Image: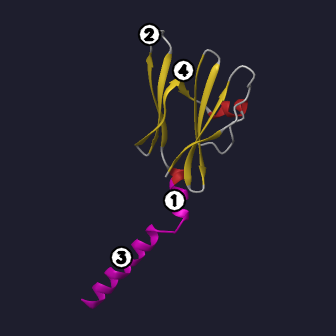
Amino acid sequence: MKMMVYISLFILLIATSCGSSGSNNSDSENKTATLAWNFTTQYDDMDIPHTTVVLMVDNKQTVVAENALGEFTVMDKSQYASYNIPENTLEACQGGWAGLVSFYIVVSENNKLVVKEGFTDEGIATPEFKNHITIN
């Protein structure tokens, strides 16, 4: 009977120590998180598209933008270099209207997901990305 208790405690100790590896655990969670964009576009009375941009992180919704101008699409990684999107970008989307193109990219920084925003317009050929929101 005592042997059974020791074996059970030993198994419990192994199971709990395998589950926590300190601060590196959240970094690996970000790297393996499932990311997906969700876009809801509505048109105003002048037929101008306004989109709510949502980032899904493991099925948890974060609204990235409301009333963003244009229809948005997920970007293929092969497009990143054309817009100077950093190589460490996990996901990216873009949407535009009347020459203005907005970009949202997701990167991992300091064990957190950071959504950055950039845009192109007349005279601005490549976007400069700035922090928009941080997701814990």
Q: CA distance from mark 1 to mark 3?
A: 22 Å
Between disc 1 and disc 4, whose residue precedes?
1
Q: How many marks?
A: 4
- Assess disc 1: are there few (<14), some (14-19) or many (≥20) residues with their C-alpha within 10 Å of its C-alpha: some
Query: Which residue occupies the foreground of this view, 53 or 8?
Result: 53
Between disc 1 and disc 3, whose residue precedes?
3
Question: Is residue 26 positioned above or below 14 on the image?
Answer: above
**Badge nearest the viewer, 1 or 4:** 4
Residue beneath the point at 49% across and 49% down = 33
Q: CA distance from mark 2 to mark 4?
A: 14 Å
Residue beneath the point at 43% across and 46% down = 58
Question: Which quarter of the picture shows residue 73?
Answer: top right
Q: Horizontal placement of 92 versus 62: left or right?
A: right
**Badge nearest the viewer, 3 or 4:** 4
Tell me where the magenta segment starts and ends, as one range: 1-29
The residue under label 4 is: 70
Residue 128 spot, x, y in % from top left:
70, 35
The residue under label 2 is: 45
Residue 118 spot, x, y in % from top left:
64, 33
